[in-house]
Amino acid sequence: MSSDVAKEKAPKGARERMSPRSGIAMVSIALLIGALTAAGFAWSQHLSDDGELAAANVYFNDVSVTEMTTGQVRAMVALDADARRSHVVTIRFDDGSVEVPVSKLGFSYDVDETVGSILATRHTGNFIDQLWDFLITPFSDSTVVASWSYDREAALAYLAGVDELTPRLPIEPALTIENSDFLYVVSGELGTTVDIEDVASQLKRVDYLSPPNTLDATQIDVLPAVTDFEAEDVASRLNDLTSRGVTVSVLGQTTTILPHALRAHLIVEPNGDTLVATFNAKSLHTAIEAAFPEPIGEFRPPKLSVFDDEVIVDEPGEPPAVCCKPGSSDWVGREILAGATGPFGVPSRPIEDPILQAWSDGSLIVEKVGEFTTPHRCCESRVKNIQRIADIVRGVYLVPGETLSLNEFVGPRTRENGFVSAGAIRTGHFRQEVGGGVSQFATTIFNAAYFAALDFDLYRSHTIYFSRYPYGREATISMPSPDLVFTNTTDYPILIWTSYTDRSITVSMYSTQHIKVEEIDQRVARGRACTYVETDRQRTYPDGEVVVDTIKATYRPAEGIDCNGNPIPPPAG
């Protein structure tokens, strides 16, 4: 029977009933279709999450980031980055150790790249690779490691500034004279340094994600450039060069700087692999100047004249020079170190003191501060002597502190010096002698000095009073004594100017007025045959200080009579 016949004869219900095997197949197909549909949906969802959510079974630092959003992933990575940057690396060396933060050692944590790596896991590659990763996701994990880098140059730059790693330079041997007259050697000391190049190389191999991290650095000894033996040779040579000190002269004045003092100004410093000696020019210059503490040379006063009470500077003077011209100590120091033995002539320099400069230029002579006139008869021989001594004294210039001795300045009153014979007092008797009458000039200049506020160092009144002089306030001179000596104790120079007529002699003193002078009292007393006069002078200074001094005079009763009323023998000859 053919198959076709069999089919036709089969009952209708028999065609609609399936076999058990067919049912199972149908279920399997349905399940497969469902699974494929679910997988397709999951796959489409996975594709849509690309760059938005982390894939399943992805781990970062052993923490699952499955289905974390981009913001959540970034927050997690940022926290991890902060934690990593706060880690330290301990660097150990012979003298100790130091902890340095990894953030300063060229370590760089890339947050963006790390976040990108997490979100890209299972979302990269071709279609087949991504599908395969997706299919095996339930059966495998993916771990993402943070993205970081190391910058060797940045690490070296930082390490070079770490105090504990900074090289301790060797101490070179030095020379000193402390507690000694001679230069001696203070020994040098080793230095040390940490090899930061080696440290930087080791840092490259550090796992910054797995702290703690410790590395051992190489510490190197650094020798001084100059040995103690070489320094000893330098000390010996310098001691020899300075063994005799040094003699210095300025404008004829000479002094010696002793070896110990000379060595105190030496500077010995390393230069490469040797010690170089120089003198401290500034301190040596100060030492030489200190050896010449006073101005050197003479003060040259200005040449002044007076016309109608106006002071005229005919020629400025020159203040005294001082030691020493700038740069002279440099030359002296070089010569000594070159083996020269001196003596060394050092040039002077102009003094820089503005007060002394003003003294020398005459600018402080601005007004009359004292003047006195005494009368005399016309045409007597004594007038010639008065005018002669006035001519000699005219123009004397006394700086503050300077003293004038009338006898020393004028010298002997001789005919060769322009003086003539005239009346004088000698041992209480009137007599004729060359230079007679000059005591009138002494009285006149005495009173001018009195009102100019000068100090009297030595004076004596006439033994017999003459009515042409102020009572009790006058002076006499003779050779060799008595003398008239006074000092300019004011703050300004004094110009002494003399003038005369046929019947009077005037002495004027010019300066800068700053002291008020008054005669405040006079006392007269008698003792036996003599009369004693005391005259008080008051000087008031700019600061308010008041000084009172007393001028004294003693007058005998008559020519040739002493204070006891006894005759005085006349002078011999």
Image: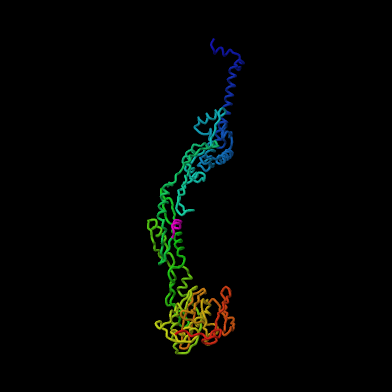
Q: Is residue 105 visible?
A: yes
Q: Quadrant of residue 84?
A: top right
Of 547 and 198, the residue lying toward us: 547
Position of residue 332 relative to residue 60, above or below, is below
The image shows residue 465 at horizontal and vertical percentages of 53, 86
Q: Residue at x 47, y 65 (%)?
A: 293
**Residue 225 visible in the snapshot:** no
> What range of the chain is rendered magenta?
257-265
Considering the image in quadrants, where does the N terminus appear?
top right
391 falls in the magenta region: no
Camera-side residue of 127 and 17:
127
Counting from the top left corner in percent of width and height, residue 198 is at: 47, 39
- The percent position of residue 125, horizontal first and vertical second, equals 50, 33
Which one is nearer the viewer's eye here, 229 or 310? 229
Residue 262 colored in magenta in the image: yes
Residue at 44% x, 82% y is 389
